[in-house]
Image (cartoon, grey):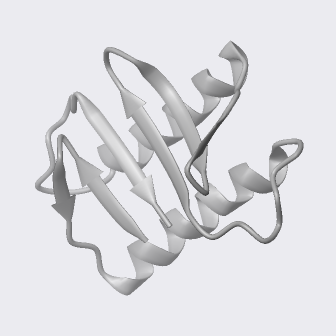
Amino acid sequence: MNLNIDGQEVRLNAFVNRIITNTMESVLRSLDDIPEDRQNVIFRADSEAGVELEIDGGPVRMNAFVQKIVGSVLQGIVASLEDVPTAPRSIEVVF
């Protein structure tokens, strides 16, 4: 799992890495029509473009409610970390 904030990779210890991975995998399990055999997942929250989900190179549509929840989860994760911007322009989680 990689976490990028404003285009910079954030180094994470094993505990934080597992928490973020488990949280985002739980989000995926909550969504409909997500393939179980997925290889590459990218969550993006951007102050300009909103929240996006990409699985195996293709976009996954999320309604505004789901986008708001996912965006809030990502912002909450980032807000709990030290030495990262308090109001990032972009957050990307790749696993």
Q: Residue at 56% of width from left, 64% of height from top? A: 40
Q: Nearer the viewer, residue 69 or 31?
A: 31
Q: Position of residue 61 (x, y in %)?
A: 70, 28
Q: Nearer the viewer, residue 49 or 65?
A: 49
* Residue 62 percent across, percent down from the top left: 70, 26
Q: Looking at this rendering, what residue extends furthest in the right direction? A: 32
Q: Quadrant of residue 25?
A: bottom right
Q: Quadrant of residue 94?
A: bottom left
Image mark count: 0
Question: For the view shown, which residue lies furthest in the bottom direction?
Answer: 14
Q: Position of residue 2 (x, y in %)?
A: 35, 66
In the picture, the quarter occupied by the N terminus is bottom left
Q: Is residue 86 above or below residue 16?
A: above
The residue sitting at 71% across, 66% down in the picture is 38
* Vertical side of 90 occupied by 64: above or below: above
Nearer to me, 69 or 59? 59
Residue 37 appears at what percent x and percent y? 78, 71
At 17% from the left edge and 46% from the top edge, which residue is drawn?
A: 7
Say which residue appears at 19% left-offset and 61% top-offset.
Answer: 9
